[in-house]
């Protein structure tokens, strides 16, 4: 595993007590939601319009996120089709009150560019 994130920083937010499960760890769904948000930000920037999530490849949680950690989510466009594209998304935790960063999970999200009516539209190829 690399010690450097892949891609550009898209989302940075602090994990709070309301986001925990009964064990005191941050819910995986909370992390996945931030990753989806980051992928959407990258997609809107790349396609210059609306995008919707259509699939997420396998996601394995490597390490837990704890209250007070800063979740940093990085994105990199992997491939572009006619109306869809894939974004590699990595989530890293900057541990509370330290400079320590650890990768917590990654996945590839597939998005489709849509028009104002929710119909697929062409992804600009430039």
Image: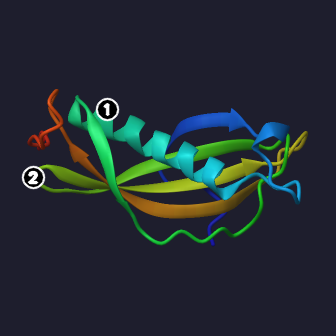
Quadrant housing residue 96: top right
Label 2: how many Cα within 10 Å (few below 14, some 14–19, many 20+): few
The x and y percentages for residue 63 are 75, 66
The x and y percentages for residue 52 are 30, 43
Q: Of residues 77 and 115, which is closer to you in this image?
A: 115
Does residue 16 appear anywhere in the picture? no
The residue shown at (73%, 50%) is 93
The N terminus lies in quadrant: bottom right
Q: Which residue is mark 2?
A: 82
- Of callouts 1 and 2, the N-terminal one: 1
**In the rendered view, would you say 49 is above or below 61?**
above
The x and y percentages for residue 120 are 12, 44
Q: How many marks?
A: 2
**In the rendered view, would you say 89 is above or below 124?**
below
Q: Is residue 101 left or right of residue 110?
A: right
The disc label shown at residue 28, or none: none
The residue shown at (77%, 54%) is 65
Q: Secondary structure at mark 1?
A: helix
The disc label shown at residue 45, or none: 1
Q: Secondary structure at mark 2?
A: loop
The C terminus lies in quadrant: top left
The x and y percentages for residue 121 are 10, 40
Q: Is residue 87 left or right of residue 69?
A: left
**In the rendered view, would you say 63 is above or below 16?**
below
Q: Which colouring convention does the figure follow?
A: rainbow
Q: CA distance from mark 1 to mark 2?
A: 16 Å
Does residue 113 appear anywhere in the picture? yes
Label 1: how many Cα within 10 Å (few below 14, some 14–19, many 20+): few
């Amino acid at each position: 595993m690399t010690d450097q994130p892949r891609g550009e920083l898209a989302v940075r937010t602090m994990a709070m007590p309301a986001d925990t499960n009964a064990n005191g760890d941050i819910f995986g769904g909370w992390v996945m939601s931030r990753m989806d948000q980051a992928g959407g930000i990258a997609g809107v920037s790349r396609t210059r319009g609306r995008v919707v999530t259509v699939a997420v490849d396998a996601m394995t949680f490597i390490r837990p996120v704890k209250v007070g950690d800063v979740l940093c989510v990085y994105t990199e466009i992997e491939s572009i089709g006619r109306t869809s594209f894939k974004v590699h998304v990595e989530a890293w935790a900057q541990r509370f009150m330290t400079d320590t960063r650890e990768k917590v999970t990654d996945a590839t999200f597939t998005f489709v560019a849509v028009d104002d009516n929710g119909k697929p539209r062409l992804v600009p190829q430039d």
